[in-house]
Structure formats: C-alpha cells, structure tokens
Image (cartoon, coloured by chain):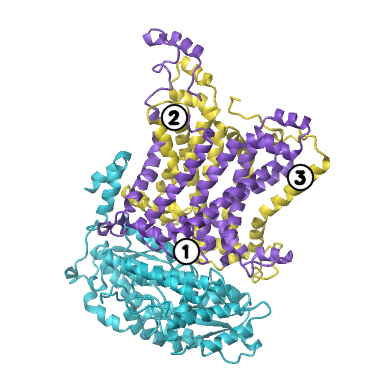
Amino acid sequence: MHSRYRRAAAIASAAVATVLATAACAGGGSSSSSASPSASANAAAISKPVTISFDEVYSSGTLKTALQSAVTAFEKANPKITVDLTTYASYGPLLTAETAQVAAGKAPTIGQAYESWAEKFASSKVIVPISSLPGASSTMSTDLSTFYTGVQNDLKLPDGQVWMWPFDKSLQVLFYNADLLKADGITSTPATWTQFAADLKSASKNGVVGITIDPGNATEGVTSGEEWLEELAASNGTPVYTSNGTPQFTSPAVVSAMEYLVNLKKEGALATGSNYPGETALGAKKGLVDLSSSAGYYYEQQSVGGKFPLTTTVLPAGSTGSVDEMAGANLVVFASATTEQKAAAWKFLQYLSGPVEQAAWSAATGYYPVTSQALTEPSMASYLKQNPWVTSTITELNNAIVDPPYAWVTQCGIDLSTAISAALSGTSASSALSTAQSACTTAKSNG
Amino acid sequence: MIGTTTGAAGSARAQQGGGSKRARRAGRSRTRDFRYTKKGWLYSGPAVLIFGAFVIIPTFYTFYMSLWNWNVLNPSLSVYKGLGNYRELLTASDPGFLQTLWNSLYFTGAMVIAGTAISLCLALLLQRGGTTMNASRVAIYLPNATPLIATSLIWAWIYNPQFGLANWVLHSLHLPTSPWVEGQATSMPAVILFSLWHEVGFTTIIFLGGLTIINDEYSEAARVDGAGPWQEFWHIIWPQLRPVTSFVVVITTILSLQSFTQFYQLSGGGPNNATTTLSYLVYEESQVLQNTGYAAALAVVLFLITVFFSLVRWRTTPDIGITS
Amino acid sequence: MTVPTVAMPRWLSGRRGIPARGRKKTWRWRRHILAVAIGVAFIFPFYWTFVISTDRPGQFDSFPPVLLPQWDWANWSRAWALAPWPRLFLNTVFIASCTVILCLITSTLAGFAFGVLRFPGRRALMALTLCVLMMPQTVLIIPDYVLATDIHWVDTYWIQIVPWGASVFGIFLVRQFFLTMPREILDAATVDGAGRLRMLWHIGMPAVRPALVIIAINVFMASWNSFLWPLVMTRSESIQPIEVGLSSFAGANGTDIPGLAAAATFTTLPLVIFFLVLQRQFIRGALSAAGSIR
C-alpha cells in the first residue's frame, strides 16, 4: 500500500488522495513493529547494534556539555547502543518537531515531554507505558521507589500508569544580590511573603526595581512569573488547579495572590519583561532578587559575572506554609520504535535516572537529583558543599506542586499568563482571573 | 488589452502562411498563431506543480481538517465536528474572535495607511540623483533586506524598558518613557513601528518606480500655469500614481494579514492578547496547543478575509493587469 | 510606452543631474539634510547592534547606554564558537542559489505562459496562483511535513529548495514584462520559424532580464531569511540554513545579548554586502517593474 501511494504523491492530481490516505495510514498501525509486553522476556540483553534517537532541549552552556558527557559515558558502558541526540532551542520548537515527526510516522525513540503533552500523546496512543518496555517490567517498581515521592507521582497519568520517566527536576529558588541586601539593611532573607514584599519595596529606589518577572505568553510557554502566582496561591491554601485539573482561578487565595503582585507593581517594586528579565536586571545591579528555576543557577552566575555575591534561598512561606513548584520535563518513549530500540531506550532511561548520572548532571546544571541516593555520590560532594541550599530544599521534591497531567493545562497556563499581564496593566485582579477561569473551563470541556 | 489584433498584421500573416482555407479570414488565425496552444499547460507546469503539491493540496487538506476535531498525532482518532470548530471560533474568549480580528485589522490598517503614506513621502523626497540620495535610498531598503529573526531579536532589546535604546532616546528628549512591548496599550504600536521600519523600504522603491514614469509634460504645464508643489502633487502626480498605489495597498494588505515572525519574537501575542492577531493565533492553536482542527478553521477564516480584501481592491481598481 | 525598459532617470544612471525642476537652493539643502537624517535613523539599529557586539563585559546593560563601539571582540569569538557557522553559511548560500535558479526557470516559463500564450484554463490557473499567496504558512507546515516524509525529503536540501522554486511574485512580474512587450517582436520570430522555446530563450529572456535580475535578488534574500520552514523540515545542522542557527542560538543563549548581537551581525553581514554590491541593479530592476504597473 505504501509504495503505491509514494509514487502517487509525485503526481499532483493524485496528491489529494495521497495526503488524505497518508493521514489515515499514519495513525493506527504505523510502520514497523509495535512492542508487545510479552515479548520482553529476554530483551534485557542487547544482542545487536541499535541506534536510538533522543529529542531534547539542552542546547547551550553546561546543559549541552553535561548531556554529551552523559551520552559518551553511556555508550562506553553499552557498546552496542548508539544515542543520536537532536537538540532544539527550547520547548516550543521541541513540541512542534515531536508532533510533526509523530504525524509523519517518524517519531524519535525518546523525547522530552511535559506532563500535559504526555497525556495527549498517551490518549492518541503514540507513546507506550514504561512498564511495557522490554526489561522494564521486572525492575521498574524498584527504580521508581528510589525517587522522591513528588517525582514518582509526577510520572503517572490520570489512569494511574507510569507513562513517563524522570530525568531532571528543578524547584524555584530566589537569587539575591547580597550587596544590595546589606545596603538596604536587610539582615536576613525574608521568611514570609509579607516580609518579602516589604523588603522589595524598601529596595526599590535609585533605579533598582525589587524584582522583574516574565508573566509569560504563548511563544514562551511556562515562565517563572506564572509559577510564582501558582506558588503564592498554594501557599495561601488553594492551588490553582484541583487534582483532577479543574481550575480554581477565582477562589479567594488565588485572587489575593494576584492582588499581591498588582500591589507590588503599584509600589514600583515589580517590573515585567521577557526572556529571563529578572536575570538581566540582577546582573545589571538593577534588581534585588530574581525568582527562577534552580536550573538557571549557572546562567545567573554568568549574568552576575562576579560583580557581587549571590545569596540563594528557598521560597518564603504563605499563610499555610511554604510551597514550591516542581518543574522539568520528563521522558517518554514513542510507540513507533522497534522492540530493540525500546529495550535500549529502557537501559538509557535507567542510566539517566540512576544515582551516578543524577549526581553528575545535578552538579553540572543546577537541577536537583531525582533520587536521594545521588546525594551520597562523591561527584556531588563539593557541589553540595558550595550550595547548601540544595540539601536544605531537596526534600521539597516530596511535596512540591505540579500542574496536573491534562492536555488542557497548556491552554490554562497561557490563560493565567494573560491574566497576570492584564492585572498588571490595570484590569482588576478578580475580573482578569474570571476571564481566565472561563477560558480554561471551556478548554477543559473541549477536552 | 493585448488580445486585440490589428487587421493588417493578421491578414498579412495569413497570406504568408498560405494554403489553408482559414487563412482568408481577416484577423488572427488561431491555429497558425504560436500563442494559441494547449502546450501552455506544459510551460506553466513546473510552477503549477510546485504550488499544487506544496500549497494548493495542503490548503484543501486544511479545509478538510477544519471540519474535524483533528488529532494530528493519530488522525484515525479524529472526531468529525462539521462546523463545530467554526462555532467555537466565533464564541471563543480570551482572546475573543472579535478582539483577534480587531488586532489583525488594526495592524493591517496601520501598515497600509502609514506605510503607504510614509513610503510615498520618502519616494517624493528621494527621487533625485546624487550620493546622499542614493545612500539614503539604500539605507531605507536595508532593513527589508535583513532577516526578520535577526532584526526582531535586536529590536526586542531596543524596546527593553529598562536598558533599551528606545527609552534612552525618549529620556534624552525629555519625553516620558514607554513600556513599549510590555505595555498593553503600547505593544501593538511598538510592533507596528518595527514593522514599518522593516517594510517601508520595499514600498518606497515601488513608488520611486511609479514616479519615474510620470509624464513630465503635465507637471511642466501645471507649473507654467502657476501651480504650487502641493497642487502639482495632488492634481497631477497622485492620479498618475493610482495603479502603483493600488498595487502597494494590495501587497501590504496581504503581507500584513499574514505577518507572524514579529509577533512571535517581539511580543508573544501579549500582553493580555493585545498583539494576538489571527495569524499569531493560528500558530498558537496549531503548534502550542495542538488544536489542529480549530487552527485549520482559523486559517480558513484568515484566508477568506485575505481573499475578501483582495477582491475589494481588484473591483475598485480593475487596472492591475490581471484581467487581460 | 511599449518597450519594457524604462527610460532611466538621470539620478539613477549615476550622473549628477541638474535638478529638472527649477527649485530654490534652500529646498535642495533641506532635502539633503532630511534624506541624511532619515537614512541615519533607519541605519541606527544596525549600528547599535554592532556597538553592543563589541561591548566589553558589563557594558551592554548600562544606562545611559554606551554609544560607541568598544572594539572588544570577545563576544564575536564566543558567539562564533557556539554554533557551526561556516557550515550554516555554506548551506544557506547553496540553498539560496539553487532556489534562485529554479525560480528563474519556473517564473520565466510560467510568466511566458500567462503573459503571451493563450490556452484554455489560463485565467483559472492565474487565479489559483494568486490564491497561493493567501494561505498562512503556519498551518500549511503540518500537511507539508507529512508530504515531505512521504517522498523522503525531510532533513534534506531538496525540501528547502523545491517548494520555494516557484514564486507568484516572479511569475506575475515576468508576465507583466511580457505584456508590455510589442507583439511584433515575437511575431517576427515565428516568421523565422523559431519554436516557442527557442523564441523564449533568444528573445524573451533578454527582454525580461530586468525582471529576472530582481527576481534573483529577491528570491536569494528571501531564501536567506527563511526560518519557520527549515526549522520544521530539517534537524541536522549539516544542512540547516543560517537563520535557524541564529534562532537556536537565541533560544539557547537568549540572555547573552552581546553574543546575540555579534551573531546577528555576522549572519546578516554577507547578505548586507550582497545587497550593497547589487543595489544598483536591484533598484533599476525594481523601477522597471514598478514602472510597468499600469
């Protein structure tokens, strides 16, 4: 069937049938073999050379070099497996590419994916559950138990199965300009959000704006600004989503979180920008603090360039305690891979999430290791010594919030970003949030 | 119109052709004229084939997709919706359809009106010889020659409210600084300003070309009669520029309705959907949100709007040359 | 007004002309000053990019901004090392050149067909061709990707050249030139027994040369500037063009503004030089084209 259609594609008049037929054929029963779990019995040993492809976004700095060393080390330990990396600049192009490849039946073996993407992939039957990978059924649950509980839960989709495997997770941290803290007479970093606001306001003078955030938009996707709103709301008692993905944007805790931001803006203690503006402001000595992913650690240092010491702390607490949001994409395995590729992929996934690689990766990038076993690895020792905030915050991985794994959450995230920029531009917090609430509810009901 | 024939030439050729009874017809013989041939399809073939395969067929495919809740990952799981996507499109919120449409029309209108006016003024200014004039013409066209990605990245930095050149210029002129792309009301004007900087060179060159064929005699006569520069422009030059102006308006409309890169790179559709045009929304729905069927419906709407504007222009100025 | 070549205005032919209109001298000076001011305003962002790219560390975000180049090339060497720029350059030049050649061929043939030949369905084809302009590319990407995979062109040079090998603008421009060409020229050729193709090659093409020049320049620049299409259709840096490289560089190093400025400068510079060298031909061609719009 395929060869006939391939020839027809070159003839314009038959192209209609071709494109439509391709669309139908690219779906169920695409190309090569699909893995059947029962065939995995003796697939633990890789017998012949196999190449697997990995779509990822580690395109610069220490991330790029660290991943390449990881791959080299893995290939050395598994001489029959070759890992082909395809790097994308950021998550937006990654999603476009993964979608296009799947649509054309040429998906990679492994790809990075957010939870909401994974749900869509799974319901479209283009990825496979981890337990179905050859060799995984026996070892998966033990491996799983070594991860922090928050990470474990993050790997599951609403049907309860494990569809993703972790690679790196990050939490949000605050990077302070230690010199400015001293100059403003702030002796200890704020422990509550109220104190945080007061400190920001007192620091905002002489061209310095306390904090600059990026509310986010459709091009950029998830940003620290939007995560901050979620953390504020959750630390005041109500997360923005329920556990089954229903938005609660108009609940009092979320509205007061938004008003907190609006108030900061009114007092000149908050500015907005795009493209990691907090990092740029901090480096230019025009900001007191930057709220950012821990994985931005090396980038912050680069921006600061040694001009002043950085103080890194956890997030302050709200009325119900301190809540952090876990970020970092997981890994999924695509259904169109061959059985051998899936077996090799499982080996690679195990390697990436194992303590040795997690320690090396974490020390190189600022991501947290997903397993506590990595903390005792020798390669982490000096990193942990220089960065005590890592050990003091890592247990947050057990109870950090994460956006629930539903496809509509992507749209809702954009709606929240829009609400933030609306509120900061003058719309009232409650009406901005109710616009977002109704848009998100529509997205949820459309599935 | 080229098609009309001169009787003398036609019959002369017919006589030279000789033999055939049809040769006695006064007027062009269709079979003997090289112009009349079905092989026209062969000549236009390569171009049509390329368009057919990569644009026309996918366009029909897009129409088709717009009727489904299309699952791009696994099309066999798509669910037929008929006109459901169009219904949802019209009742959408955040951003609403009217808001998105307004943003597109705002941008396009500003580009057409300001772009045409500015490039016409520049053309009138620069229609002289000399090194400075030449250098200025090149300088104005240069932004159009450079990649939109590179210039968008630089202008994103120029527009930075804290560190950017734009606010420094305002500051030096003792004018209030602006949030540029970060402000809800100033974002679209900022994108328009950038787009004008990028596009004006192209339309200026076109106007310059139109000005070169203006018949000098009329202008001379008008000046002899004592007309001032404004009257000379309005009564003599402007009417003669009408076909060129039409062309510029049509091209600018089509290009502006589809503009995407600057919205993607500079403003990300925000803040608060202030710069979310139909074209940007198509990107957002198809690439970010994977609502392929819905995005296809949006694309169809955008397509129809573009066709509508083009038809309106062609109705009002039939001398674009397509009718021959 | 029948010949497709427009009487070249004195100011374009390069001779310093006496202004045809007898205006006062002050007008001339005002005109020149205004022209210079506007030119500088348009060029300034490019100058600014260059300045940022040569800033010493810590200068790019100072306020008031540094306005003179500091001649520190560290940003250039850093940006140069972060992507395989020479390969990307070669790719871009290769792709752009091939696209130009293909476009010239298809535009001449189709422009000839639409402008000179008469055949059933001609008007329909022309209307269809015009409609090509109106479909937003962001949506065509997905069906095109499926087609590209089906013919095994993904991640090749082919997919970056062939779909762009026909230009609506080019076709109609060539057509416009043929429309303004006197019929006698081509008729005379048939008398001599020339076939259509030969007629096109020997007589048609030289007559529409200004159009071909402008098409070549335009298509080359458009190909150099292409971004979304190669972003989706290609994955290997060994065949990607330079704008994708710049975008990846920006996505990955977005906050390295001086490095970004350096990369933007050296990815744009070849094109700018190309344009500056050819700008006289370009403008001449553009004027002829514009002058034939009626």
* Numbered badge on residue A219: 1
Q: Position of residue A56 (x, y in %)?
A: 40, 66
Please report contact status of discs 3 and 1: CB closer than 8 Å, yes or no.
no
Residue under the image location 41 percent in, 72 percent down: A437
Dot 3 and dot 2 within a common chain: yes
- The colour one sees for chain A in the rendered image is cyan
**Chain B painted colour:** purple
Query: Where does the image place residue B196, in percent across and percent down from the top left?
Result: 60, 52
The image position of residue B250, as x and y in percent, is: 53, 43
Q: Nearer the viewer, residue A63 or B187?
A: B187
Q: Which chain is yellow?
A: C
Residue C266 location in percent, x, y?
59, 56
Q: What residue type is labelled 1?
A: Thr
**Of the residues shown, which amino acid type is indicated by label 3?**
Arg
Q: Nearer the viewer, mark 3 or mark 2?
A: 3
Q: How far apart are marks 3 and 2 (CA)?
A: 45 Å
Task: Quadrant for residue C70, please give it.
Answer: bottom right
Q: In this view, does C180 lie to the left or right of A63?
A: right
Q: Name the residue under label 2.
A: C113
Upstream in the sequence, badge 3 or badge 2? 3
Tell which subunit mark 1 falls on.
A
The image quadrant of residue B166 is bottom right
Cα distance in 3D space between marks 3 and 1: 43 Å
